[in-house]
Amino acid sequence: MNIPIPVLGDKTMIGLGNVFCILSGLLLGPVYGGAAAGIGSFIFDLIGGWASSAPFTLVFKFMMAFVCGIIAYGGDKTAKNVKRLIVAAVCGSLTYCVLYLGKSYIEAALLGNAAEAVKTILIVKGSASLTNAVIADVVAIPLFIAIRKALDRNHIHGKIHN
């Protein structure tokens, strides 16, 4: 589910993809979660009309889940500290925002856009990216806690993250 947003000849979107990237980092840890987020988002881009950005998406979404997983499991191998989960999710989401907006700035500048156009592009993309970040963090953390409880009941959770 997503809402595409045209931006001066480019596009961005508000959607639920980042929820699953953050959830991947929380559930699977940094490496496996990063791989799941990066590869899944890469495939989405390839089949969803965003093929030109797919390689960047692979790296950026990997980094989002990787940072989230490193923080979530860094000092608490059980990932049960809610404050740490919040910090992990927010840092993962902000990592993606910085990478995405950095790429967007470089692209807009290299294409020779006027300063005002670059500013408009970054404002629109930044607003969409931050909206996605808030949605991802607000949805992924409680979802992770619910899923983790089910996995713990079945003695599975400790076996799936790295």
Image (cartoon, grey):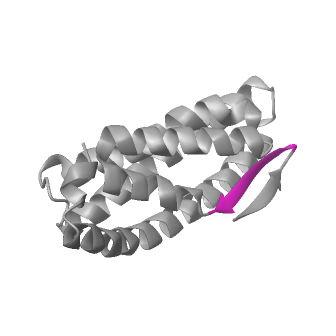
Choose between 143 and 6: the one closer to the eye. 143
Magenta segment: 9-15
Between 147 and 107, the one nearer to me in the picture: 147
> Residue at the spot x=74%, y=23% of the render?
110
Is residue 101 visible in this depiction of the protein? no
Classify the position of the N terminus by image quarter: bottom right
Residue 102, image quadrant = top right
Is 75 located above or below residue 61 in the figure?
A: below
The location of residue 156, given as percent across then percent down, is 24, 60
Residue 37 position within the rendered picture, expressed as x and y whole percent measured from the top left: 49, 45
Q: Is residue 89 visible?
A: yes
For residue 77, side relative to residue 150 (left or right): left
Residue drawn where x is 41% and y is 41% of the image? 34
Q: Is residue 122 magenta?
A: no
Task: Give the side of residue 142 with respect to residue 1, left or right.
Answer: left
Quarter containing the C terminus: top left
* Placement of 55 over or under 119, stated as above or below: above
Residue 80: percent from the left, percent from the top? 18, 66
Residue 154: image quadrant is bottom left
Figure disc tally: 0
Would you say 159 lies left or right of 139 here? left
Where does the image place residue 20, in percent across and percent down from the top left?
Answer: 49, 58
Overall secondary structure of the magenta stretch? strand
Residue situated furthest front in the rendering: 154
The residue at 19%/55% (across/down) is: 158
Residue at the location (42% across, 67% down)? Answer: 140
Residue farthest to the right, as pictured: 9
